[in-house]
Amino acid sequence: MTGAAEDAVDVIVVGAGPAGIACAFRLARAGRTVVLVERGTSAGSKNVSGGRLYTYALEAVEAGLAAQAPWERSVVREQVMVMDGERSLTVSLAGGPASTPGLPTSVTVLRARFDEWFAGKAEEAGALLATGIMVDSLIEEGGRIVGIRAGGEEMRAGVVVAADGVSSVLARAAGLVGELSAEAVGVGVKEVIALDASVIEDRFAVGQGEGAATLMLGCTDGVHGGGFLYTNAASVSLGVVASPAGLSGSGRTVHEMLQALKGHPGVRPLIAGGHTLEYAAHLVREDGWRGVPRRLTREGFLVTGEAAGFVLNLGYTVRGMDLALLSGIAAAEAIVAGGDLEHAYRAALGRSGLSATMRAVRGYDDLLQIPRLYRMYPGLALDLAGSIFEVGPEVPRPVRRRVHAALRANHLPLRTVLRDGLVGVRSV
């Protein structure tokens, strides 16, 4: 790197995750000189996520990319598993129309493999990938960001893009975001567990190359959070995300929750015989649209991806990579457009549908903040489901009495359930 202003590039993108790579790719395609800086030894080596990608977003970067991508399995089965103690109830939905003709709606990916491939595409488009570089600070002159410092050296650019993840150092240094609160994030841990492809297909009732995505409620000891299980080509990704604010008073760690989940009767048969290939931890944004900063830019600087809060956790689905890709595209479009960077970026985010998507579900945060959702409702759901299958010498109880008995057993007054239901209705 150099300190000479005449050697400045058009754009420096910090962070080779989906948002940063998409931004660098589109800028290079537009003829801009762009350097993509990554602290890991390769793109994806430091990146962690559950591992589900919606293909429409990759197609938005450039048509045809999704078909080329090294994805693991196409998701053909959506599942929600509710747990209480040793019990579990799984609701499964198979099939459904594809959002893009000829492509699965979503696929599973392993980030190290996918991100490295995607960064290679950005390089083919003309971006320069610089790995193993930890950015120390921003260079500011006259109120404008003009570059970065790393390892005692400087690199200058017309625009610096911060795509450096959930706890973005650069976005904080630029004054766009503050420290994350414990309520704004979840602590996630994940294991990738090796299993034979045929075993996965048999256990999850899917065909060759097909897979399932399972989200879990009731596996966090009453703490705000949940679990996930995604199928890969020859492995599964199993993880737990829990609120650090809740963990502090629970006496449990998220690692302990994951180990308990591995032994749960609803999960244990699905991973039996497997061995752990990878273990990783990550902070996950959980504040939705409310966590997006009021300003996303300042002169010579822009924040995108998870660093800007573009993540959705809706309980029944978690969306990170697709929103990261859309925001990276929007960042590139804003830079290419020139003029007022904030206005151009907001306009591009609007055209992508990202802003409207996040606003449309911002009420879900109110629903997901109800503690009974994690402490009492899983037991209620399983009690009600179990009562349906009760068979004995006694005369069957009327449904009304079964419901009241389940409410009493879980210490849930009917008025509380109705009030929480109203929050749920308002959230949509």
Image: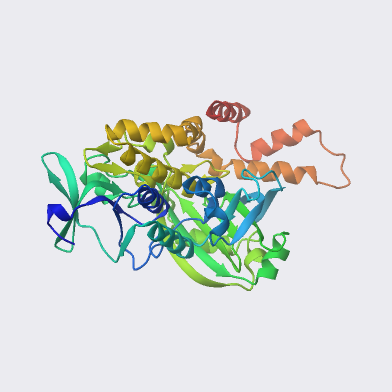
Query: Position of 330 compared to 241: left or right?
Result: left
Residue at image coords 36%, 42%: 331
The residue lying furthest to the front in this view is 31
Asked if one can make out residue 319 in the rendered structure from this viewpoint, the answer is no
Which color mode does the image show?
Answer: rainbow
Q: Position of residue 378 (x, y in %)?
A: 61, 44
Asked if one can make out residue 204 in the rendered structure from this viewpoint, the answer is yes
Query: Position of 23 compared to 151: left or right?
Result: right
Q: Position of residue 21 (x, y in %)?
A: 39, 54
Quarter of the image where the N terminus is located: bottom left
Residue at image coords 49%, 49%: 62
Q: Position of residue 410 (x, y in %)?
A: 62, 40
Closer to us: 280 or 400: 280
Q: How many marks?
A: 0
From this view, report whether residue 279 is shown above or below residue 214. Answer: below
From this view, report whether residue 299 is shown above or below residue 52. Answer: above
Quarter of the image where the C terminus is located: top right
Query: Position of 388 compared to 209: left or right?
Result: right
Closer to us: 77 or 7: 7
Q: Position of residue 19 (x, y in %)?
A: 40, 49
Residue at image coords 79%, 42%: 388
From this view, report whether residue 340 is shown above or below residue 50. Answer: above
Quadrant hosting residue 121: bottom left
